[in-house]
Image (cartoon, rainbow, N blue to C red):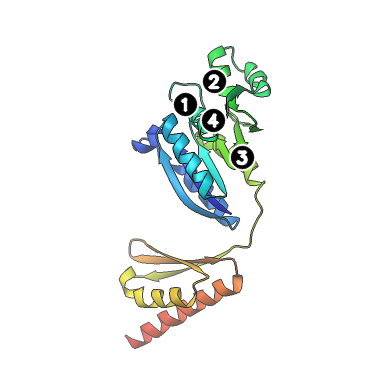
Amino acid sequence: MKFAIVSVGNELLKGYTVNTNASYIAKKLTELGHEVKRVIVIPDDVEEIAHEVKEASQFYDFVLVTGGLGATHDDVTNEGIAKALKRNLSVNKEVYDYLKSMSDNEFALRKISSVPEGAEIIWNDVGAAPAYIVENIAVMPGVPEEMKNTFEKILKKFEKLEYFEDQVRVDGYEVRILDELNRVVSEFPDVQIGSYPKFGYVIVKFSGKNRDRVRMAVERFRELLKRQSEQT
C-alpha cells in the first residue's frame, strides 16, 4: 500500500519540536513492506488540514494524520478532517463518558470527544484524546507516546508484505563510488538503492520485495567495489 503522513502543528513548522512521529510511522510501515510516498507538515489551520488531507486521501491508499486533537484553541484537526470529508462533527458518547471520569470541564470533554460522524474510535491508553479511523484516514494524537500507543493498534490492520533489506558500509566519500552505484542501480531496477553519506563513510542500503534480488544487488555492488580497489 502507498501511504501519506500528514503532521499537523505550528510547533513543527517553527522548529520547536522535532517530527519524530513521522519517522516512527514511516519506519514501521517500511518494515511491513509498504511505501510512504509523502510526508506533509502543515500548521494548525482548518482550511490547510482539509485541503491537504482531502488531496492525499485521493492520491494514496491510506493517510495517517498526527496532532491537533486536544482541547486548546489551536487543536483543530478534527474540524479539518470533517471538512475534508464533508461530514459533521458529533460528540461520541463512549469517548465523552470515558473522559468524564478524568475531568469535569465540559468544554474540553465536548471538544475532544467531537469526531467526524461514522469514525471508528481507537482508544488511547496513555492519554485523553483517542485516535480514530474514517474512510481511508487515521487520525492520532501528536504526543509521541500517545501516537505510538494508538498507531500500534492501527498498524495491525495492515497486511505484512514481503520486504528485505541489507546495507554496505564504504569508507571515504560518496563521489568515489558513483560509477559502481549507478551501475548497480541500472542493473537492478526492482531493488531500491539509497546512498547515505556520513562523516568519513557512506552507507548504501538495498531493499525490495524479493530477498534473492536484494542479495544479488548487494553482491554485485561488493564485486564492483572490489574490482575498483584492485585497479587503483
Q: Specify the amino acid type for callout 1.
A: Asp
Verify CB contact (< 8 Å) between mark 2 and mark 3: no
Residue that badge 4 annotates: 82
Of pointers 1 and 3, the one earlier in the residue sequence: 1
- Residue 172 picture location, percent across and down: 33, 70
Verify CB contact (< 8 Å) between mark 2 and mark 1: yes
Location of the N terminus by quadrant is: bottom right
Q: Secondary structure at mark 4?
A: helix
Residue that badge 3 annotates: 135
In screen coordinates, is 54 left or right of 175? right
In this rendering, the label closer to the viewer, 1 or 3: 3
7 lies above or below 193: above
Verify CB contact (< 8 Å) between mark 1 and mark 3: no
Q: Nearer the viewer, residue 43 or 179?
A: 43
> Residue 128, can we see it?
no
- Residue 163 picture location, percent across and down: 59, 62
Residue that badge 2 annotates: 111
In this rendering, the label closer to the viewer, 4 or 2: 4
> In the picture, residue 41 is in which quadrant?
top left
